Amino acid sequence: MKTIEPCVLVIFGASGNLSRHKLIPALFRLEVARRLPEKMTILGCSLELWSKDEWITEVSNMLESKFSDGVDEQAFERFRARLHYHPNPPGDGDAYLKLRNVLAENPDFSPNIVFYMAVRPSEFPAIIDRLGVMGLLKQQNGWCRVVIEKPFGYDLLSAQTLQKSLYRHLNEPQIYRIDHYLGKGTVQNVIVFRFANILLEPLWNNHYIDHVQITHSETLGIDRRADYYEGAGALRDMIQSHLMQLLALVAMEPPVTLSAEHLRDEKVKVLKAIRPITQNSVHAHAFRGQYTSGTINGKPVQGYLDEPGVAPDSITETYAALKLFIDNWRWAGVPFYLRTGKRMAENSSAICIRFKKPPQDLLRHTHRESPHPNWIMLGIQPNDSLKMEIQVKVPGLDLTTRTISLDATYHKGSEEDYDAYEGLLLDVMQGDHSLFLRIDEVEWAWRAVDPIIKVWAMERDFINGYQAGSWGPRGTYRLFDSDDQFWRHSLDPEGADLQAY
Ligand code: BG6
């Protein structure tokens, strides 16, 4: 465990969704685990004209609504001593000057600073610029790091423009482009699973793998985030960032070491090898949809167009599915299917890898149904899991086969389960970039999806609907390369055939 120097974490957007649901709870869990450095302070910055006490009450409310089992009182006493607040109301031209004075004069604040941009992406450049003009990004007496939330830009060009604006005041080692998916335990386990075990390496290529599916489905809708989501959509919100990162981890070559640069070099090679989708081939490679009203967990829910803040003629996609090919020696010809959706049947994120069928079906007279190929599945959420499906003989006098699942779920009940942000916040404080994105990764991921974004932006007349609570729009099957490929909705063997659409 590395020691962490004292620092002040300044959260812009402290009263917003991200801070409320992810950052403050993650910091509190680090407090409970006694992993925050002793002299670390948290300075909330937001539009509200709150006093420090009002901010502490607000934080206490955030924690109470997050931890329904109760908030550890002793930990909260320690936590509240770290909390400070700085109002940053619109139109206050002196807010940044005041911030500089507060940071310089209050002896509680360490000269090491992390600025966390938990605000709308359109606000990143202006905030960085003001901090830069005030000299707050210079590393004179201590270090200064800036965490930028996704999406980094809304296409390749805007990502490059944003990057230029950051480089006016920051150098690369100061920038932490966060993709919270990389903080998830099972996502990191992809690296361990692949590179700490030799067993699978000979099979991990186009000779044995038929295709790979990467899914993130949610039952939640857009949850009052229309102002952001209307301009983003599922492709930018989940696929360009989180799911492309999963694809890179599954497909990359073993890095020389696990250092940040070596790891990111290998991920970039995969992203560079993605076969470009031309505008003419967008329909063969991508499918989008938008949820209509339906039922989730037995309760009726409204359609996307009825969500507050959504334009009545919006064609923003809440579901997106892609087929990508990685044109390199290992993966030539293997389709990677990526899909994500809001208001889907279940909350589930998983990587499912389907192997090819044996070259000769010696047991063809013994199957009750069509033969099942092998699958390896890494469940990311709701449960970390690792499953492998194989064929066995059914006990009895006849030679018949069935599928069983070897469940190598490795999470023990007593082991502490953290959300992604805890580890990533510690990494920033420790100066470890391994799980953060380098600018070339972001650019190559945009290059892969830009043609789709362009075509979808032009086709404004129609978008496929899907009922809330279903597995997405009918018609996405057309992305599959062969008749025996289908979306895998469940990680259980009996669910393997739920192919619907
Ligand atoms: C965020 C997206 O990055 O990831 C959200 O903006 C999405 O739309 C979320 O709901 C999913 O992450 P998690 O960790 O809640 O599964």
Image (cartoon, rainbow, N blue to C red):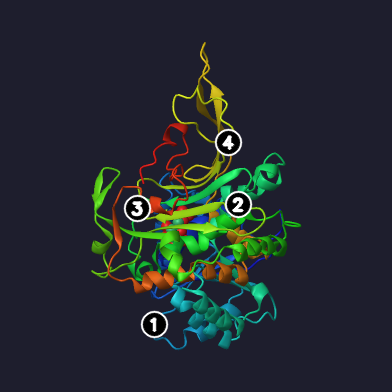
Q: Could you tell me how far apart the alpha carbons at marks 2 and 1 are, in whole angstroms?
A: 44 Å
Crowd around label 2: few <14 · some 14–19 · many ≥20 (10 Å): many
Q: Could you tell me how far apart the alpha carbons at marks 2 and 4 are, in whole angstroms?
A: 24 Å
Identify residue for label 1: 90
Of callouts 3 and 1, the N-terminal one = 1
Camera-near label (4 vs 3) is: 3
Of callouts 2 and 1, the N-terminal one = 1
Identify which amino acid the numbered label 4 is placed on. Answer: Lys
Q: In the rendered image, is residue 144 in sight?
A: no
Q: Could you tell me how far apart the alpha carbons at marks 4 and 3 are, in whole angstroms?
A: 40 Å
Label 3: which secondary element: loop
On whether ligand 1 comes within 8 Å of the CB at mark 1, the answer is no
Q: What residue appears at the point 30 percent right and 59 percent down from the top-left corner?
A: 464
Q: What residue appears at the point 44 percent right and 69 percent down from the top-left corner?
A: 280
> Residue 152's x, y, as percent?
51, 71
Quadrant housing residue 92: bottom left
Q: Is residue 404 above or below residue 253?
A: above
Camera-near label (2 vs 4) is: 2
Camera-near label (2 vs 1) is: 2
Identify which amino acid the numbered label 1 is placed on. Answer: Pro
Q: Which mark is residue 475?
A: 3
Of callouts 2 and 4, the N-terminal one = 2
Q: Is residue 499 above or below residue 7?
A: above
Q: Is residue 67 above or below residue 406?
A: below
> Residue 107's x, y, as percent?
61, 74
Crowd around label 3: few <14 · some 14–19 · many ≥20 (10 Å): few
